[in-house]
Image (cartoon, rainbow, N blue to C red):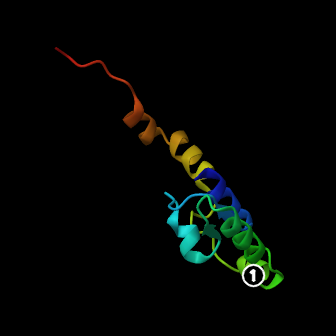
Amino acid sequence: GGIQEEAAWLRVPVVVLRTSTPRPEGVELGLARLAGLDADRAVGAAEEMAEPARLASLAELPCPYGEGNTAARVAALLADPSVQQLLELREPVL
């Protein structure tokens, strides 16, 4: 699933050699194609995904997995003193 997410962010088409994926958003948008393990089907999918018109259309699609700013958002939360209080480890009183 990670490769599918990274490729979607970069707008690089992906042929997934499985019959299902835990990342269906890319398939639904056309950024990924499920091909299973059939070699002919995989080659056909790769040829189709590499067509110039398809590549151009993929460049215009939004990334279905977010905006790419999660690390900055997490860092800001961890720097917030009120969030730090929530993350303090406390031993239970018995």
Res 44 quadrant in image: bottom right
Q: Is residue 44 above or below residue 69?
A: below
Measuring 52% from the left and 60% from the top, which residue is drawn there? 23
Provide the residue designation for mark 1: 54
Query: Residue 34: where, in percent of width, then height?
Result: 59, 66
Q: Nearer the viewer, residue 94 or 2?
A: 2
Query: Residue 64: where, in percent of width, then height?
Result: 57, 68
Residue found at the very far left of the displayed protein: 94
Q: Secondary structure at mark 1?
A: helix
Task: Count how many numbered circles sit on residues in the image.
Answer: 1
Relative to residue 12, is residue 2 drawn left or right? left
Residue type at mark 1: give it: Arg
Q: Nearer the viewer, residue 42 or 83?
A: 42
Q: Is residue 79 above or below residue 51?
A: above
For the residue carrying disc 1, how many other residues have a C-alpha within 10 Å: few (<14), some (14-19), or many (20+)?
A: some
Measuring 83% from the left and 81% from the top, which residue is drawn there? 52
Residue found at the very far right of the displayed protein: 52
Give the quarter of the figure containing the C terminus. top left
Res 45 quadrant in image: bottom right
Query: Residue 32: where, in percent of width, then height?
Result: 63, 68
Residue found at the very far top of the displayed protein: 94
Measuring 74% from the left and 77% from the top, which residue is drawn there? 48
Measuring 57% from the left and 63% from the top, which residue is drawn there? 65
Relative to residue 86, is residue 33 drawn left or right? right
